[in-house]
């Protein structure tokens, strides 16, 4: 998997426009020919560290394992990959608050070619997503898990959750597919999913699934 920190072109990749790229279509193509996970499937595992426990926060694509820049601070780790370019990493950054969304991530919003992992590390109740960050995660695919956490803190306060771990994996397209979530307030959260290669108009697209 290649790594590239440059800002992606928001309109065209390999002759395929945003309007032509549709993950739902790719998944429908896969499901219509379902014979098990196809060759070239990329397994993905993510850990959200809980209270400085072992193991630490990580994101693994097949045998390639990525880590945030530090395991010692409470933070949110944002990693985005290009589904149309062999899962090339286009964003890899962190934030240390629960309000903002990195500029380089915000630029991807509304574009279905990109898939985003938002992984908490050593989180405390005061770092539960709020404001702009909460709205962004809801728009791209967070579901019942994050909504339930927000209900708890809105009723009882952030002090009711001393520590937590949370992961969201979703496209950056708004209101398309539900994302994948993992959460715990007693230990590390683990998220397991896969990217399957699907041919769409002679182009290989990696479609996210959870088997």
Image (tube, rainbow, N blue to C red):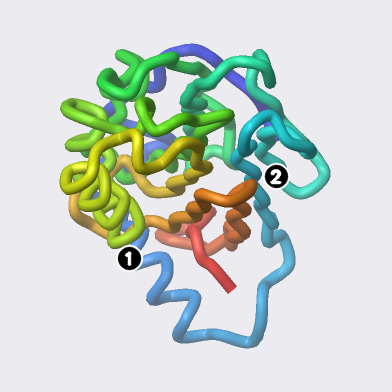
Q: Nearer the viewer, residue 101 or 18?
A: 101
User: Going 23% across and 36% down the picture, which residue do you hit?
Assistant: 134
Residue visible at 32% across and 24% down?
A: 98
Q: Is residue 172 left or right of residue 43?
A: left
The answer to whether residue 106 is above or below residue 112 is above
**Residue 61 bears which disc, if any?**
2
On screen, 71 above or below 164? Answer: above
Label 1, on which residue?
Answer: 24
Identify the image quadrant of the C terminus: bottom right
Q: Position of residue 21 (x, y in %)?
A: 31, 51
Q: Position of residue 26 (x, y in %)?
A: 41, 65
- Label 2: state its secondary structure: strand
Q: Position of residue 175 (x, y in %)?
A: 19, 53
State the residue in front, 131 or 197.
131
Q: Quadrant of residue 32?
A: bottom left
| Residue at figure coordinates x 40%, y 39% from the top left | 114
Q: In terms of image quadrants, where is residue 56?
A: top right
Q: How far apart are labels 2 and 1 at the CA level? A: 22 Å
Residue at left offset 67%, top offset 75%: 37
């Amino acid at each position: 998997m290649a790594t590239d920190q440059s800002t992606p072109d928001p309109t065209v990749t390999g002759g395929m426009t945003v309007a032509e790229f549709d993950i739902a279509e790719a998944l429908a193509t896969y499901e219509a020919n379902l014979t098990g996970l196809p060759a070239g499937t990329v397994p993905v595992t993510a850990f959200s560290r809980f209270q400085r426990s072992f193991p630490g926060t990580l994101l693994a694509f097949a045998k390639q394992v990525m880590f945030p820049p530090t395991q010692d601070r409470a933070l949110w780790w944002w990693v985005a990959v290009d589904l149309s370019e062999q899962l090339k990493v286009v964003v890899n950054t962190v934030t240390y608050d629960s309000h903002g969304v990195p500029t380089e991530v915000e630029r991807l919003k509304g574009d279905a070619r990109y898939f985003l992992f938002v992984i908490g590390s050593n989180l405390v109740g005061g770092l539960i997503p709020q404001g702009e960050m909460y709205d962004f995660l809801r728009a791209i695919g967070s579901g019942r898990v994050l909504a339930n956490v927000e209900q708890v803190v809105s009723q009882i306060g952030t002090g009711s959750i001393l520590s937590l771990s949370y992961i969201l994996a979703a496209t950056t397209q708004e209101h398309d597919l539900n994302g994948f979530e993992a959460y715990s307030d007693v230990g590390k959260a683990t998220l397991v999913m896969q990217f399957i290669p699907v041919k769409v108009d002679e182009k290989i697209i990696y479609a996210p699934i959870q088997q």
